[in-house]
Image (spheres, rainbow, N blue to C red):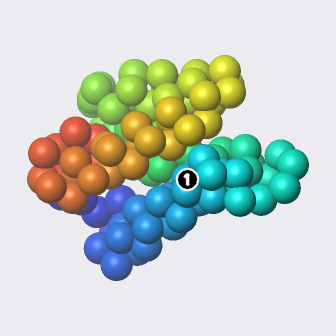
């Protein structure tokens, strides 16, 4: 249920990498705009699998799932510059899928 990339080890790696990037961005450990870039990277790592799976389900299986509007809203948050908030929400969706709460990721 929590298989984002098809391998649980890569799923945990994605979650830990997101945490690391979010920590570096939030605490401004890097100079200039690099901290914002780390937050953006964490958000993209979390949003990409969600949008990819939702779009494939919508296009190929002709099945509308609630992940598509959630992904679109998270993408809109990225365009508005809310990198930390989007990264945190994507991480919570990822952790929820690890706990088998079935919030977002593909079955």
- Residue 101 placement: quadrant: top left
Q: Name the foreground residue: 8 vs 82.
A: 82
Left or right: 93 in relation to 55: left
Classify 14 as above or below 105: below
Name the residue at 22% across, 48% down.
96
Classify 65 as above or below 27: above
Question: Looking at this rendering, what residue extends furthest in the right direction?
Answer: 32
Q: Name the foreground residue: 4 vs 37.
A: 37
Name the residue at 63% across, 58% down.
24
Disc 1 crowd rating (10 Å Cα; few below 14, some 14-19, many 20+) is many
Name the residue at 61% across, 28% down.
82
Q: Is residue 12 visible?
A: yes
Left or right: 34 in relation to 93: right
Name the residue at 15% across, 55% down.
99
- Horizontal and vertical percent position of residue 60: 38, 40
Quadrant where the N terminus sits is bottom left
- Horizontal and vertical percent position of residue 67: 33, 32
Question: Looking at this rendering, what residue extends furthest in the bottom direction?
Answer: 9
Left or right: 76 in relation to 97: right
Classify 88 as above or below 15: above
């Amino acid at each position: 249920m929590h298989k984002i990339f098809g391998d649980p080890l890569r799923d945990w790696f994605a979650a830990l990498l997101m945490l690391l990037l979010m920590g570096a961005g939030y605490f401004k450990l890097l100079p200039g705009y690099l901290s914002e870039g780390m937050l953006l990277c964490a958000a993209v790592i979390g949003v990409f699998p969600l949008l990819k799976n939702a779009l494939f389900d919508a296009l190929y299986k002709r099945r509308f799932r609630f992940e598509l509007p959630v992904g679109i809203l998270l993408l809109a948050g990225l365009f508005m510059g809310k990198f930390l908030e989007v990264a945190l929400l994507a991480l919570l969706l990822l952790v929820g899928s690890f706990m088998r709460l079935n919030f977002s990721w593909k079955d």
